[in-house]
Amino acid sequence: MTQTPVSGTPPRILPEIDDTARQYWTAGADGELRIAFCAACGRYIHPPRPECPDCAGPLEFRAVSGDATLFTYTVAHQQFNPAVPTPFVIALVELAEQPGLRLVTNIVDCDPEALACGMALRVRFEEHRRGETPVFVPVFAPALT
């Protein structure tokens, strides 16, 4: 299932976009979360790198479901950037496709008091620009049941 990017989000420090991670940061334009995959090992690799860390095989990007569970999180109350409202949630989520496949992200559209490790989440995308390059930052929100 694809997700529609959302705009009007708080500013972010955006990554350098290089060939190794370009598909990860731009796939949100299509509403898909794409993760590097090693066909030789049959497993997903994150963060993206030039080759598989286990077998040195080539990596390709594959769309994943966007379903995840909340592994752990912290609530930030310190305002480091005056344009970013607090509190905000920094989280480690585990994608449904593979045990141990985790992403550092933010949780959105949820009261921090309502969070619980193990809760079901769904990917969303924040659209930003780095110069002329659109960047789609994957964030997660509680899954609708």
Image (cartoon, rainbow, N blue to C red):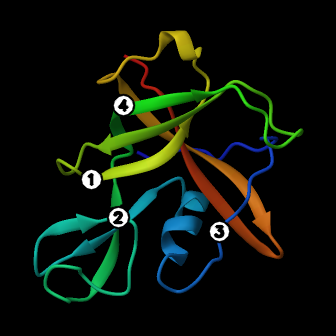
Q: Do the residues labelled 2 and 1 touch (CB within 8 Å)?
A: yes
**The furthest residue to the right:** 82
Of labels 2 and 3, earlier in sequence is: 3
Q: Which mark is residue 46?
A: 2
Of labels 2 and 4, earlier in sequence is: 2
Residue 2 seen in render: no
Vertical arrangement, residue 81 with respect to residue 37, above or below = above
Residue occupied by mark 3: 15
Left or right of 24: which side holds 128? right
> Quick one: label 4, few (<14), some, or many (20+) residues within 10 Å?
many
Cα gap from disc 2 to disc 3, whole angstroms: 15 Å
Of labels 2 and 1, earlier in sequence is: 2
Vertical arrangement, residue 119 with respect to residue 106, above or below = above
Q: Which of 104 and 27 is in front in this view?
A: 104
Q: Which element carries disc 3, helix, strand or loop?
A: loop
Q: Which of 95 and 72 is in front in this view?
A: 72
> In the rendered structure, which amino acid carries the disc numbered 3?
Pro
Of labels 3 and 1, earlier in sequence is: 3
Residue occupied by mark 1: 101
> What is the number of callouts on the image?
4
Q: Residue at x 33, y 50 (%)?
A: 102
Of labels 4 and 3, earlier in sequence is: 3
Q: Which residue is drawn at 41% across and 63% down?
A: 34
Cα gap from disc 2 to disc 4, whole angstroms: 17 Å
Q: Which element carries disc 2, helix, strand or loop?
A: loop
Residue occupied by mark 4: 70
Cα gap from disc 3 to disc 1, whole angstroms: 20 Å
Left or right of 5: which side holds 102? left
> Quick one: label 1, few (<14), some, or many (20+) residues within 10 Å?
some
